[in-house]
Image (cartoon, helix red, strand yellow):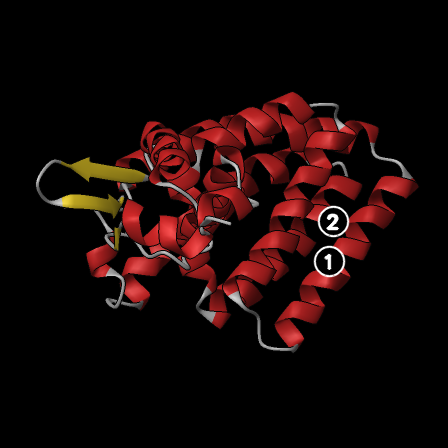
Amino acid sequence: MGKYEISRYSSEEIYQLLKEEILSLHLLPGQKVSENELAHRFNISRTPVHSAFMRLKSDGLINIFPQRGTFVSLIDVEAIQQVIFLRIHLERAIYTEAAEKWTPEFLAELDENLQQQQAEVDKGPSANAFFAVSNQYHKLFYEFTKKQKLWTTMETMQFDYIRYRKLSYSLPSTCIRKLQEHRQLRELVQARDYDGIYRFVPAHISGEIESLPQESGAFHDFFCE
C-alpha cells in the first residue's frame, strides 16, 4: 500500500496543524518550510500541503518567494499596533458592560481562571500554557456580554499579536505582571469603577509591545524591518 493511500491527514488538518505550530512558535518567524519535507512528515502527497500553504499565505502566516522558498512570516509591529488600537476601543466597551451587568457566577468564573493563571505562574509558566489561560480570561468577558462573534472575528485578525504576546510571555516577569493586571481588572469590574476601567485598558493591552523590545534583544530577527 502506497504512502498516499494510508495518509490520515486532509488539507484542512494540515492547515490547522501548521497554523498552530506557527502561532505556538514551534515554527519560528523567518524559518524556512518545505512542501516536500512536510509531505514526507505527514506521509501525504504535496497537493494537500500546497493547499494548506495557500491558506497560510492568505492568513499572512507564510511568505512564498519564487526561486527562494517558503518562510514563516516575520512579525509585523504595525499590524500589531492596529489590533491594539481596535482592542482598546472594543474592550473598554466590553469591560464597562460587564461591570454594569456582572453576576456572582461571572465573578466566580473569573476567579477560577485567575487561580489557573496563578498555578501556571507558580510552576514556572510556559508561554503557550499561560497564553491559553490568559486568553480564556479575556474570552469570558466576550461570552458574558454576548460578543462571541466579535471574539471570533478578532482571533482571525491578530495572528501577529498572538505571536508577539507569546514571545512576551516567555519572560516570567510578563506573566506575573499580567496576572496582577487581570486581578486588578476583576476588582474594577466588581466595583463598577468605569473611570478606572477606561484608564486601565490601554496600558494593559499595549503593555507587551512597549516592554518586549526593551527587555530582550534576542527576538530582533523575528520582526519586519
Q: Position of residue 164 (x, y in %)?
A: 39, 50
Q: Helix or strand or loop: what does disc 1 sit on?
A: helix
Q: Is residue 151 above or below residue 180?
A: above
Q: Which residue is under mark 2? A: 187
Direction from residue 182 to residue 35 in the image, left or right: left
Query: What amino acid is at disc 2?
Result: Glu
Whole-number angstrom distance, CA of label 2 to CA of label 1? 12 Å
* Between 173 and 54, the one nearer to me in the picture: 54
Q: Position of residue 173 (x, y in %)?
A: 48, 70
Q: Position of residue 167 (x, y in %)?
A: 40, 59
Direction from residue 46 to residue 222 in the image, left or right: left
Please tell me whether mark 2 or mark 1 is closer to you in this view: 1
Q: Which residue is under mark 1? A: 114
Q: Residue at x 62, y 40 (%)?
A: 196
Q: Helix or strand or loop: what does disc 2 sit on?
A: helix
Direction from residue 187 to residue 41 in the image, left or right: left
Q: Residues within 10 Å of mark 1 (few under 14, many from 20)?
A: many
Of all residues, the one furthest to the left in this rendering is 67
Query: What amino acid is at disc 1?
Result: Leu
Q: Position of residue 45 (x, y in %)?
A: 38, 41
Q: Is residue 56 above or below residue 108?
A: above
The answer to whether residue 66 of the structure is visible from this angle is yes
